[in-house]
Amino acid sequence: MHAQPVTAPLHSLDQWDDAVRDRYDPTRSKDQFRQFNEDTTPPVVREFYRQNHQFQTLEFVLGKHREYGDLNLGELGIWEAMEKLNTLVDDSDPDTSLSQIEHNLQTAEAIRRDGHPRWMILTGFIHDLGKMLCFSGEPQWAVVGDTFPVGCAWSDKIVYPEYFAANQDRYQPALQTKNGIYEEGCGLRNVHLSWGHDEYMYRVTRQYLPEEAQYMIRYHSCYPIHREGAYAHLLDDHDRVMLEWVRKFNPYDLYSKSDTRPSLDELRPYYEELVSEFFPAKIRW
């Protein structure tokens, strides 16, 4: 059992989302790209990454697979989960911040405007519902954050790689080689990623969605792989094809957010029909 850190948390989960959005801003020049200095990155975000990198060990991840893998938290409908998640508001700026459901609607509506398939619109709507882990008592570093493989050497393309100095896996030589516990070309389906809302939501929804959607949900926070090109030696040919869907999805997640609030009352009938097309009234969580 790992000790829980007692340092101050993010004001809201949106702080991590905003930090990622700024990090990958396509208008930034190359000399600004991936610059994480003390002046521009909020201390609370740096502290979040410190905790994330310290506590996301292989043992921790496998423990969460056992804890949540059987989906034994109960049954809940997609809309019920969305409304529950909607109580996670940004406490740091309640007058201008969007609720979780509004961000999800903005993402989905941007996908819809560009004429993508209905399953992809739905994916945009539900992709962050794995943040329901917050209601199970999980610390923020086990809910959000850039995801990355555990069980092998950490790439220097992971944000703040120096924070892995406090991770206990560094003392296990078998976990510090390029391949670690994996075989080259084994495919992402055989690789354990750091635990968070991506993996959890993938497990909750995988039987209902096409594989392209499963990849979008499971790997949308895995920036070291789909944006930085790290861990290419672990991918197989199928991953290389499917990750293109993740790259197609990612800009809608990062750059659809604005202060213009979507009208839930106007959009709800469309999304109720869309959800019912793919999901039963209740699913296991």
Image (cartoon, rainbow, N blue to C red):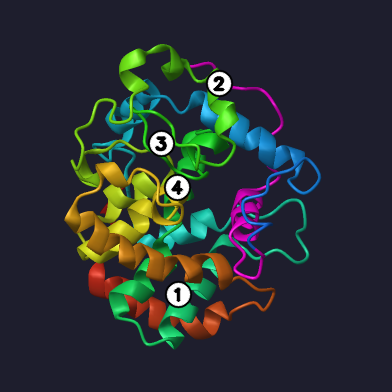
Asked whether the beta carbons under mark 2 and mark 3 sit within 8 Å of each other, the answer is no
Q: Which mark is residue 237?
A: none
Q: Is residue 137 found left or right of 175 in the rendered image?
A: right
Please give the residue where the numbered disc 2 appears in the rendered image.
165
Residue 261 appears at what percent x and percent y?
Answer: 64, 77
Which is nearer the N-term, disc 3 or disc 1? 1
Please give the residue where the numbered disc 1 appears in the rendered image.
108
Asked whether the beta carbons under mark 1 and mark 4 sit within 8 Å of each other, the answer is no
For image coordinates 74% across by 43% down, the residue present is 37
Check disc 3: other Cα within 10 Å, few if <14, some if 14-19, many if 20+.
many
Frontmost of labels 3 and 4 is 4
Overall secondary structure of the magenta section:
loop
Q: Nearer the viewer, residue 156 or 17?
A: 156
Residue 2 appears at what percent x and percent y?
Answer: 48, 17
Q: CA distance from mark 3 to mark 1?
A: 26 Å
Q: CA distance from mark 2 to mark 3?
A: 16 Å
Q: Secondary structure at mark 3?
A: loop
Frontmost of labels 3 and 1 is 3
**Amino acid type of the residue that numbered disc 2 sits on in the rendered structure:** Ala
- Looking at the rendering, the stretch of residues picked out in magenta corresponds to 1-29
Q: Secondary structure at mark 4?
A: helix
For image coordinates 45% across by 87% down, the residue present is 113
Please give the residue where the numbered disc 4 appears in the rendered image.
224
Q: CA distance from mark 1 to mark 2?
A: 39 Å
**Amino acid type of the residue that numbered disc 1 sits on in the rendered structure:** Ala
Check disc 4: other Cα within 10 Å, few if <14, some if 14-19, many if 20+.
many
Residue 259 appears at what percent x and percent y?
Answer: 69, 74
Asked whether the beta carbons under mark 2 and mark 4 sit within 8 Å of each other, the answer is no
**Amino acid type of the residue that numbered disc 4 sits on in the rendered structure:** Pro
Look at the image and tell me whether residue 209 can be seen: no
Q: Which mark is residue 194?
A: 3
